[in-house]
Amino acid sequence: MEQMELVHDPATADAKVLEHLRNLGCDPRQARGIRHFIYLPTSDDAVAVAQVLEREGWDTAVEEGADVWLVVAGCLRVLDEHLVRETRARLASLAAAHGGAYDGWEAERAGAELRI
């Protein structure tokens, strides 16, 4: 089984995922499904965040958890470091504005998903 490396810096983690996708042979010019995860303290906050993201063209789902609400925001994008960095900053800021936290993203690749 492959050893997983724990990376605390989000920018470094994002760069490693992009590198891993390239190493798996994923064409960096090909759009792929991306999902981002945002945790919010209340249903109202989750719905508000989902509505903002939907107006920006994201597909969203709101899920209730134990004492927390999750917004899953999906899109189809061509990934590069600039897009990943800007998206992380945007979603972290939106989450913080509603008392929540951004919890990373995952990218689809043929038959599998990579999560960060």
Image (cartoon, rainbow, N blue to C red):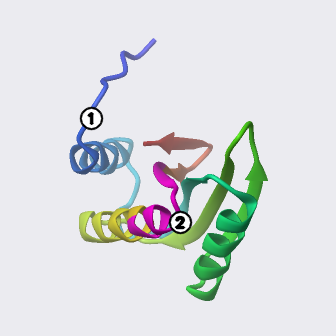
Q: Which mark is residue 8?
A: 1
The residue beneath circle 2 is 98
Determine the image quadrant of residue 5: top left
* Identity of the residue drawn at 57% across and 70% down: 75
In this rendering, the answer to whether 73 lies above or below 105 is: below
In this rendering, the answer to whether 94 lies above or below 37 is: below
Q: Which one is in front in this view, the residue at disc 1 or the one at disc 2?
A: 2
Q: Nearer the viewer, residue 53 or 14?
A: 53
Q: Amino acid at mark 2?
A: His
* Identity of the residue drawn at 64% across and 58% down: 72
Determine the image quadrant of residue 67: top right
* Identity of the residue drawn at 29% across and 42% down: 13
Q: Nearer the viewer, residue 53 or 65?
A: 65
* Identity of the residue drawn at 23% across and 41% down: 9
CB atoms of marks 1 and 2 within 8 Å? no
Q: Position of residue 56 (x, y in %)?
A: 56, 85
Magenta segment: does it hold 6?
no
Left or right: residue 78 versus residue 51 is left
The crowd level at tag 1 (other Cα within 10 Å; few <14, some 14-19, many 20+) is: few
- Write down the region rendered in magenta: 93-104
Determine the image quadrant of residue 49: bottom right
Q: Which mark is residue 109?
A: none
- Quadrant containing the C terminus is top left
Magenta segment: does it hold 94?
yes
Q: Position of residue 34 (x, y in %)?
A: 53, 60
Q: For the residue labelled by badge 2, is the local secondary structure a helix, a strand or a loop?
A: loop
Q: Amino acid at mark 1?
A: His
| Distance from the alpha carbon under mark 1 to that under mark 2 | 23 Å
Residue ranking furthest to the top: 1
